[in-house]
Amino acid sequence: MLPRDNRLKRESDIKKLFKKGKGVFDSHVGAKIMKNNLALSRFVVVVGTKVHKRAYKRNKIRRRIRSVLYDHMSHIATGFDIAIIAKPQALNASFNELQNSTLYALKKAKVLEEVPKL
């Protein structure tokens, strides 16, 4: 689970991120990134009902993406608000595919400082 300080919770912050953030997308996930002028990065994982109608399937994807973020937190640059958006293709993806896609999107957005060995 992500530490409390690294969670983006306020709806106004999330709306601002979606409105003004830079978007990058990969096969299974996309990312919206915006500077936040804080000493840490904050994350939100969005899995909409277009991915799947059932909540337990959306929650499974959300848990997997959060696990990837938690495992690679030390490699992600500080001072950013980051939204990870799951695409419908994420539903049938394995954990490794989801991990690679998430890390590639962060690398493409230039917030992944050091590419970890996978």
Image (cartoon, rainbow, N blue to C red):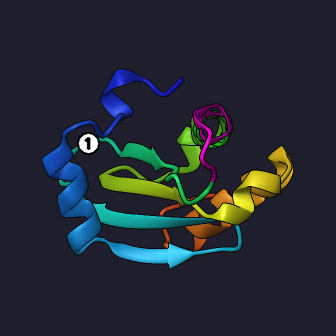
Q: Is residue 112 above or below residue 53?
A: below
Q: Position of residue 109 (x, y in %)?
A: 49, 73
Please name the predominant secondary structure of the magenta segment in the image.
Answer: helix
Furthest residue to the left?
Answer: 12
- Taking the spot 73% from the left edge, 64% from the top edge, the residue there is 89
Q: Is residue 37 visible?
A: yes
Farthest residue, direction front = 53
The structure residue drawn at horizontal position 37% and vertical position 34%, both measured from the top left corner, is 6
Q: Residue at x 40, y 45 (%)?
A: 44
Along the viewing direction, whichever of 81 and 58 lies nearer the viewer: 58
Is residue 115 in view?
A: no
Residue closest to the eye, 8 or 75: 8
Relative horizontal placement of residue 118, taking residue 89 as reference (left or right): right
Membership of 57 in magenta stretch: yes
Task: Report the amino acid beneath label 1.
Answer: Ala
Badge 1: few (under 14), some or many (20 or more) residues near its Cα, within 10 Å?
few
| Residue depicted at 42% across the width and 76% down the height | 23
Q: Give the structural element (helix, strand or loop) at label 1.
A: loop
| 116 is within the stretch colored magenta | no
Measured from the top left, where is residue 81 in percent x and y?
A: 32, 53
Which stretch did the figure color magenta?
A: 52-60
What residue sits right under mark 1 in the picture?
39
Q: Position of residue 20 (x, y in %)?
A: 22, 73
Question: Relative to the observer, which residue lies in front, 103 or 112?
Answer: 103
